[in-house]
Image (cartoon, rainbow, N blue to C red):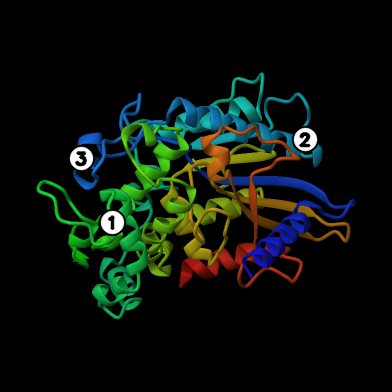
């Protein structure tokens, strides 16, 4: 069944990548996560949850690594090859791509690195709202463009688990056991308690008042979310875990522990009421850009607009519009470094303008090995069905896409 599913996904990717010869690609909007960064927590903090030493990054916490920049440039080169072939981009035109990034170092540096591959030979300018300011596309509440009903948002999250996080968490037993064994390097979970160490089993499920605009979640899933993301980043950065004494850390073991992070993200960020708060303004801007209308990101010359944000950016946008995706080696809906939602505006041979959406990401192997991306050796691609809009062909009429965005924000 797994093989059949992969073949079906590959077939869908071929269909998505091979539009009719008379179709014309007119506009592309890419909403991407930043590239590989250093862990957000210090090695000392992470080592309170592991039996083995933690890799040391050569950049400050949360900053894009040198490997992360190189990987982003490889992805940018792939985008360029693809869109030159499809006739969107000219070989030499430095005004074709517009870059917008959130104000963090990792997002700005990712946009710059993407530009080296996507706009080679051009001094690609990365636009932001400016240091110290809140960007409405990424932080709409802090920027003052959204006034959330916090009580309603928290009720929406709690309602998805019947108000009982312990019961919800109980369904993740296998992933909890796998993570416990991996972090504490024991053969059978639960691993013995060790003085001074935090165990995933000791994290008690519950709602927390410590949150910005929605609801805080405590428990194994929240514990795992930061730790597994740090594992993913260090693995993708090429860090030598085996040399530090780690056993059993590989792509297969990472896949077994990713579900905890995904469960936490799905509940905390993809709940529609939360996603409406966090991604409504961004969705409006994406729709406006695809329509070349008021509120569009970029200028009239830009044929491509690249918006660089965070995993939460994509999670909330996906939750708002009901978008689902899966890539080999990852959990459904997972947003790895450099993963992107791509929205293409096509003019079909019948004159209709449609949106074709997909999720694309470098595989774990492509990340760790810094594999060059080409049209013959591309990143993973997952075509996306837009609920309420997409037809059997996956084409989503442009006017209907705008209506779907408006309806999602209004609800």
Question: How would you rate the neighbour count of disc 3 (Cα within 10 Å): few for under 14, some for 14-19, many for 20 or more?
Answer: few
Q: Is residue 295 visible?
A: yes
Q: Are marks 1 and 2 in contact (CB under 8 Å)?
A: no
Instruction: Give residue 353's quadrant in the image.
Output: bottom right
Instruction: Give residue 40's quadrant in the image.
Output: top left
Q: Residue 20, position in %: x, y? A: 86, 55
Mark toward the start of the polypeptide (2 vs 3): 3
Question: How would you rate the neighbour count of disc 2 (Cα within 10 Å): few for under 14, some for 14-19, many for 20 or more?
Answer: few
The residues tagged by marks 1 and 3 sit, at their Cα atoms, a distance apart of: 17 Å
Label 1 element class? helix
The residue pinned by badge 3 equals 45
Left or right for 5, reference 22:
left
Q: Residue 390, position in %: x, y? A: 68, 68
Q: Nearer the viewer, residue 185 or 215?
A: 185
The residue pinned by badge 1 equals 180
Count of marks, rendered view: 3
Label 3 element class? helix
Q: Are marks 1 and 3 in contact (CB under 8 Å)?
A: no
Question: How would you rate the neighbour count of disc 1 (Cα within 10 Å): few for under 14, some for 14-19, many for 20 or more?
Answer: many
Mark toward the start of the polypeptide (1 vs 2): 2
Task: Please state, as top left, top right, bottom left or bottom right, where the N terminus lies in the image.
Answer: bottom right
Mark toward the start of the polypeptide (1 vs 3): 3
Q: Which mark is residue 99?
A: none
């Amino acid at each position: 069944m797994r093989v059949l599913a992969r073949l079906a996904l590959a077939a869908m990717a071929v269909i998505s990548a091979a539009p009719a010869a008379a179709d014309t690609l007119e506009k592309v909007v890419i909403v991407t996560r930043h590239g590989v960064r250093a862990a957000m927590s210090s090695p000392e903090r992470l080592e309170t949850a592991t039996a083995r030493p933690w890799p040391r990054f050569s950049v400050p916490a949360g900053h894009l690594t040198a490997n992360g920049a190189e990987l982003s440039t490889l992805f940018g080169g792939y985008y360029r090859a693809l869109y030159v072939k499809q006739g969107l981009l000219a070989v030499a035109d430095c005004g074709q791509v517009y870059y917008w990034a959130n104000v963090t170092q990792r997002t700005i540096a990712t946009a710059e690195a993407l530009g080296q591959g996507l706009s080679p030979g051009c001094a690609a300018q990365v636009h932001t709202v400016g240091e110290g300011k809140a960007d409405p596309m990424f932080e709409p509440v802090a920027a003052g463009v959204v006034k959330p009903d916090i009580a309603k948002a928290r009720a929406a999250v709690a309602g998805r688990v019947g108000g009982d996080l312990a019961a919800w968490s109980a369904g993740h037993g296998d992933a909890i056991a796998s993570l416990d064994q991996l972090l504490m390097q024991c053969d059978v979970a639960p691993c013995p308690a060790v003085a001074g160490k935090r165990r995933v089993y000791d994290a008690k499920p519950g709602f927390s008042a410590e949150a910005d605009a929605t609801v805080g979640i405590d428990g194994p899933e929240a514990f795992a979310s930061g730790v597994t993301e740090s594992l993913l980043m260090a693995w993708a950065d090429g860090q030598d875990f085996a040399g530090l004494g780690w056993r059993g850390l590989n792509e297969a073991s990472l896949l077994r522990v990713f579900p905890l992070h995904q469960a936490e993200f799905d509940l905390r960020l993809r709940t529609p009421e939360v996603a409406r708060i966090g991604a409504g303004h961004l969705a409006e801007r994406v729709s406006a850009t695809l329509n070349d209308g008021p509120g569009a990101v970029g200028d009239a010359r830009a044929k491509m607009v690249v918006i660089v944000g965070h995993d939460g950016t994509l999670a909330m946008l996906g939750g708002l519009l009901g978008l689902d995706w899966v890539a080999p080696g990852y959990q459904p809906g997972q947003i790895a470094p450099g993963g992107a939602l791509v929205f293409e505006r096509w003019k079909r041979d019948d004159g209709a303008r449609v949106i074709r959406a997909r999720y694309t990401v470098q595989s774990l192997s492509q990340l760790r090995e810094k594999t060059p991306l080409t049209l013959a050796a591309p990143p993973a691609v997952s075509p996306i069905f837009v609920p309420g809009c997409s037809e059997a062909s996956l084409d989503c009429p442009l006017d209907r896409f705008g209506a779907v965005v408006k309806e999602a924000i209004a609800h």
